[in-house]
Amino acid sequence: MIIAACTDDRMVEDIARNAAEGNHHVFGKWYKVFDKGIPDLRATEDLFIVAHGAAFGDEGQPVIGSKGDDFYLTARDLNTNLTVFPDGYSGRVYVYACLSAAPGAGGLSFVESYKALIGQSFPKLTAWGQTGKPSGPLPLPTDKSWIEARNGQ
C-alpha cells in the first residue's frame, strides 16, 4: 500500500500513482492521506509513505508532509494518526521523503523516531527512509537508496 502524505503537490501523488500502476504487485493500491476507507494492511504487507520531508522541522524534529502549506507530521503525529496496522503487524514501512533517514536536532531521523514509537506495539516492524532528496520514481524495496532505521538509535 502507498499513502501520499502531502496535500499541496501533485508530484507526490504522481509518484504514488505511477508506482501503484507500474508495479502493483510490489506497491499495491495508493491512497491520499485523508482518503476515507483506507483499509488496514495485511500482517506482512509493506507500507510506502510518499511525502516531502525535512530533517529539521517542528521543534527541530524531522517531519514529513506537504511542500509549502502547514500540513506536516512528526513521527509522534504519524504514529498517533495512522491506524492501518493490524495486530501482529510485521511488515516494512518505507518513507519516501527528503531526509527521512537523516538525523534531526535530537539525533534521530524521522524513520528512527517512528520505529522507536511504533516498535513498542509492533516489534517485528522495520522502517526505512532516504538520506537525499528523492523526486521519483518510487524505488523498489531492494533499491540501495533505502536506509534502515536501527532500533530507534
Image (cartoon, rainbow, N blue to C red):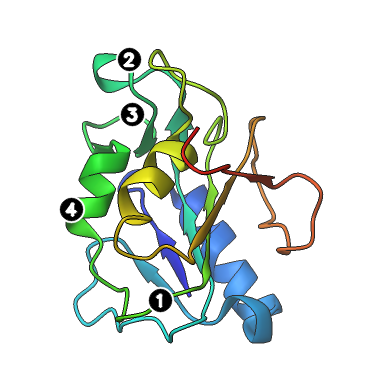
Question: Under tag 1, what secondary structure?
Answer: loop
Mark 2 lies on a secondary structure that is: helix
SS category of the residue bearing label 4? helix
In the rendered structure, the answer to whether residue 36 lies left or right of residue 137 reads left
Q: At 39% across and 37% down in the image, what residue appears?
A: 113
The residue at which mark 4 appears reads as: 80
Sequence-first disc among 1 and 3: 3
Q: Mark 1 against mark 3, which lies toward the viewer?
A: 1
Q: Amino acid at mark 3?
A: Gly
SS at mark 3 in the image: loop
Residue denoted by label 3: 68
Q: Nearer the viewer, residue 66 or 57?
A: 57
Neighbor class of circle 4 (other Cα within 10 Å; few <14, some 14-19, many 20+) is few
**Circle nearer the viewer, 4 or 3:** 4
Residue that numbered label 2 is attached to: 60
Q: Position of residue 105 (x, y in %)?
A: 40, 13
- First-in-chain label (4 vs 1): 4
**Left or right of residue 8: residue 128:** right
Question: What crowding class fits label 2: few (fewer than 14 Cα within 10 Å), some (14-19), or many (20 or more)?
Answer: some
Real-space Cα separation, disc 3 to disc 2, in angstroms? 17 Å
When the figure is inspected, residue 134 is found, relative to residue 125, above or below; the finding is above
Q: Is residue 76 left or right of residue 50?
A: left
- Classify residue 61 by image quadrant: top left
Instruction: Specify which label sits upstream in the sequence, 1 or 2.
Output: 2
**Dot placed on the residue nearer the N-terminal end, 4 or 2:** 2
Q: Which residue is mark 1?
A: 89
What type is the residue that disc 2 sits on?
Gly
- In contact (CB < 8 Å): disc 4 and disc 2: no
Q: Tell me residue 10's x, y (percent).
A: 45, 51
